[in-house]
Image (spheres, helix red, strand yellow):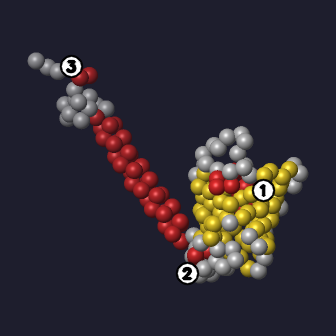
Amino acid sequence: MTIPYFLRSPLDPAGPRFGASIRRVLKSCAMIETNLWRAAALVALGMNMAGCGDGLGTSPSPVIAGPWKLNAIHIPATNTTTIITRPENYTVTFDKGSRLGIKADCNVCGGSYSLSGGAISIRETFCTLAYCGDTSNDRAFLDVLNNATNAGVSGDILTIRSPKGEARFTR
């Protein structure tokens, strides 16, 4: 009895001619998986090296070091000031090695920063890209941080300013 052509295994040498195509697809999938692992390794390396350079191994200024919760954000383009009702959802943490951790509502971000006197530069920011909803302030918050030009601490209040707006934090 002969097995019908279309019922034979694609990997069977006596099977359909598209067996070679499936082998090519499987090989392509293996290459994609390898490339995904390489990309993940590069992201991990980037996260690990985000603080490399001038600030490697240094601690942030004791005045700014540690976590801060967003209390209010002012956007000059719309002349609006928003009081943040859930400050635990909008945080920035200044860590050793000029590393920066950010929670922007439903997104988590990282990057690096440099601080010299009152001048601040936040760079190499990478984030998850979840949609947090129409009422979220995540985009405005990240716009202010990613364009930050200066920062100042007065008591327990940190103010970060940028052309996009001003963010006020407390510990």
- Can you say which quadrant of the picture contains the N terminus? top left
Q: Residues within 10 Å of mark 2 (few under 14, many from 20)?
A: few
For badge 3, the amino acid type reads Pro
Could one spot residue 147 in this view of the protein? no
Could one spot residue 119 in this view of the protein? yes
Q: Earlier in the sequence, mark 2 or mark 3?
A: 3
Q: Position of residue 49 (x, y in %)?
A: 53, 71
- Can you say which quadrant of the picture contains the C terminus? bottom right
- Please state which of residues 2 and 158 is positioned toward the viewer in this rendering: 158
Mark closer to the observer (1, 2): 1
Please tell me which residue is depicted at 71% across the width and 40% down the height of the picture: 134
What numbered label is drawn on residue 72? 1
Residue 75 relative to residue 122: left or right: right
Can you identify the residue that label 2 sits on? 57
Compared to residue 90, the image places residue 64 above or below, namely below
Mark closer to the observer (2, 3): 2
What numbered label is drawn on residue 117? none
What numbered label is drawn on residue 4? 3
Q: Earlier in the sequence, mark 1 or mark 2?
A: 2
Residue 152 relative to residue 31: left or right: right
